[in-house]
Image (tube, rainbow, N blue to C red):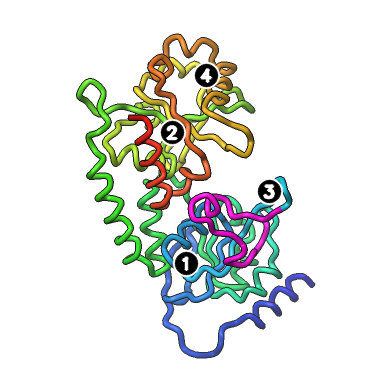
Amino acid sequence: MKSTLLAGLAALCAMPAYAQEMRTITDHSGYEVTYPVAPQRIVSLHDWTTTVMAHELGANLIGSSGRLDNDGNYFIRSARELYGLGFDQIELASVHGDLDMERIATLKPDLIITNVGDTLEYRDQLAQIAPTIMFEPMNGRPPMENYAEFADWLGEGDRFNELKAAYDARIAETKGRFTIDGRAPSYIAIMPNMESGEIRVFRNYGAQSTVLEDLGFTHGAIMDEVPEGRQDANFSPEIVGRLDTDYIFMTHITDRGETRESLMAQLDEIAPGYRDFVPAAQADRFVSMSRFHVYPTTFAAMNYVLEQLDTLQ
């Protein structure tokens, strides 16, 4: 019955019967997707990846998934923090973790964009409503490579190149300001994993690691031990002795009351005594940034990282 209703809604929401130029791509889930070259009604079902990128690129985004805050208000994670984007500007398509197929269909999308991790199992249902592209931000590839491909999918390659040129100019201005003993500093991106009692090491971390690498920071060797095709992996606390980089970067969620100090305290529980010998702890070079500002790989996020780094000098 539900399948019949969904099919009926999809038929009602079909675009008018005039010829549209179409293209076919293979998305990150391996599906071939055929969709309009110039989509006019895009619905995004993952806020801090596909929504923020589509919005920054100026794509025709009409709806997004959202989340419920502690006050009972819906918001768009990272889009709120980076752009002030909310549901007074676009439609609420679904609540994160609870896809509403009927609501999505009533928005009459001509393209649905979403991420592999949260919605792959619903891909066939979504594709009954509109062509559906699956994006995977945690595939182990450089974040900017993923973003450039995403921009091409949406036909916004020119806008991406424009934004990247401005970002590259800012990197060129800033590069060389961060040195330690005349050399480029080293860094590692980690998070304490309190559930498993391990240390989570990132191969890359969105805007944060992208900016660091572009500025010439060298990453710690253990980051290369994260398996290919993955963004992160958990390691035993025994690796604390290998956290020998000049800087250690983490992220915190302000709404949960997290701070740099609270994350360092969590690391105290997992790896007692680390402050006595880890170079970044001894030199006060543990840095934590707001997760919702720096996890997305967008140019607004990367500019935020640059601003935060300026405060370290």
Q: Which of marks 2 and 3 is nearer the N terminus?
A: 3
Asked if the magenta segment contains residue 305, the reply would be no
Name which residue type carries label 2: Val
Q: Earlier in the sequence, mark 3 or mark 1?
A: 1
Q: In this view, does 18 lie above or below 103?
A: below
Name which residue type carries label 1: Glu
> What's the magenta region?
73-95
Q: Residue sitting at 77 percent across and 70 percent down?
A: 2
- Residue 237, labelled with which disc? 4
Q: Quarter holding the N terminus?
A: bottom right
Label 3, on which residue?
69
Q: Which of marks 4 and 1 is nearer the N terminus?
A: 1
Q: Do the residues labelled 3 and 1 touch (CB within 8 Å)?
A: no
Q: Quick one: 53 or 121, which is closer to the camera?
A: 53
Q: Do the residues labelled 4 and 2 touch (CB within 8 Å)?
A: no
Question: Badge 1 local density, few (<14 within 10 Å), some, or many (20+)?
Answer: some
Label 1, on which residue?
32
Q: Quarter holding the C terminus?
A: top left
